[in-house]
Amino acid sequence: MLDIPVPEHPTSLADWLAHAERLHPLAIDMGLERVQAVARRMALKLDAAVITVAGTNGKGSTCAMLESIYGQSGYRTGVYTSPHLVHFEERCRIDGQPVAAAELVPAMAEVEVARKGQGGEPEVSLSYFEFTTLAILRTIARAGVDVAILEVGLGGRLDAVNIIDADCAVITSIDLDHTAILGPDRESIGREKAGIMRTGRPVVVSDPMPPASLIDHAREIDADLWRVGVDFHFAGDKQQWGWATHPSRGGRRYSGLAYPALRGANQLVNAAGVLGAIEALRARLPVTAQAVRAGLALVELPGRFQILPGTPTLVLDVAHNPHSVAALTENLDAMGFYPCTHAVFGAMADKDLDAMLARVAPLVDRWYLCDLPLPRAIKAADLAPRIQALPAGDRALAGTFASPSQALAAALEASAPADRIAVFGSFHTVGGVLQDGLPKRSAKHLGA
């Protein structure tokens, strides 16, 4: 640890986060120059195998499965994911557990000292994401982990996480999201995601139909490209699934695998990419077949097609773009018949809302629209006309609400025990429900 003076204030994690929010004029300011400058002053370095995960959807699930399998193998794991659902500390996990707030405070102070500069160094302005990323990377470095699993926040090439060279890059599904920043089509977005690749090091692409820009970049920089359907394959039936590498990749095979504990058909594609990364790093981090089986069986990640026990059936999903909402729709459809499906929905205004709503609308009977506590969020009142324009029209709109928890309470009150409620549209929609605590079930739901 550097011998640096620690500022007297702030002293709590909440105060540091409030401080970080005030430092930079832009919430999102893509580029690595500022964050690299501060990282150099901090002498930031991870003495661990580093796996960086980028993609439009499936990043959090991929990180969780990697964490679970390596943890079952006895390795000490450090994970950085974003955003969080309820508590900021969820963004940094050591050995599968969120770090305590007190563990992040010294790292925040160290970032601040480096940012301000010493001995005539100029002060550097950092965004909230850049500031907190540096603090979490320092916390992971200090924990002495064997493997660091880092989820890219946005894009890849210019994301703050990309200041760390990945020993293995994983790129999950590529679809349209954040188009104003990353580009208008899959090729542009793929080019940004490809920025996490490194020459001579493995990159695992689990998108079955990756953009050409992704493959081209891997070849241009001579990365060790592992593609699903080319270098490794997977197949499954209703009971189990199997995975194997091409003979040119060693011919390793797993058969009779149980499905990952994370629900949803899309998780099999994510799991296949995870096994690709584990195989690509096998020489450095050997993993047993038993650890793979146990890791997939025991993995947990809130808010990814999470079905809570009790009645009515309650589904939480952070689906927040057309691609992830399409996956949610397929998973809801596969659940079978429910007399009525209620949807609690709140979203960011810059998403392709019409595409999201059109995809899931055939399965939703009643909509409960909610405000979210962010300037980027669309107001429930402004969402209402979009719902009224759907084929079901005014009949489908149950109301607008000031928060996700109020919308869920109304949906629970209106639902029968055999019904289903889906909460989705944003991390903040699911997080708002979890943060305020789930409403108590009424007497009718308890069979009274």
Image (cartoon, grey):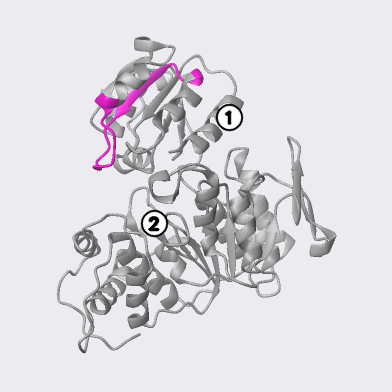
* Residue 255 covered by magenta stretch: no
The image shows residue 55 at horizontal and vertical percentages of 52, 51
| Residue 20, numbered label | none
Q: What's the mark number on residue 330? A: 1
- Front residue (pair 344, 290): 344
Q: CA distance from mark 1 to mark 2?
A: 28 Å
* Segment colored magenta: 362-382
Instruction: Point out residue 233 in the picture as x, y percentages from the top left corner.
Output: 76, 50
In what element is the residue under mark 1?
A: helix
Residue where numbered disc 2 is placed? 90
Q: Is residue 411 above or below residue 32?
A: above
Q: Amino acid at mark 2?
A: Glu
User: What secondary structure is found at the residue carrying circle 2?
Assistant: helix
Query: In the displayed structure, would residue 293 be above or below residue 145?
Result: above
Give left or right: position of 182 versus 434.
right
Location of the N terminus by quadrant is bottom left
* Residue nearer the viewer, 372 or 357: 357
Residue type at mark 1 is: Glu
| Residue 263: quarter of image | top right
Label 1: how many Cα within 10 Å (few below 14, some 14–19, many 20+): some
- Would residue 240 be found to the left or right of residue 124 on screen? right
Q: Earlier in the sequence, mark 1 or mark 2?
A: 2
Q: Nearer the viewer, residue 423 or 362?
A: 362
Quarter location, residue 21: bottom left
Tell me if I can see residue 62 in this picture. Answer: yes
Say if mark 1 contacts mark 2, CB within 8 Å: no
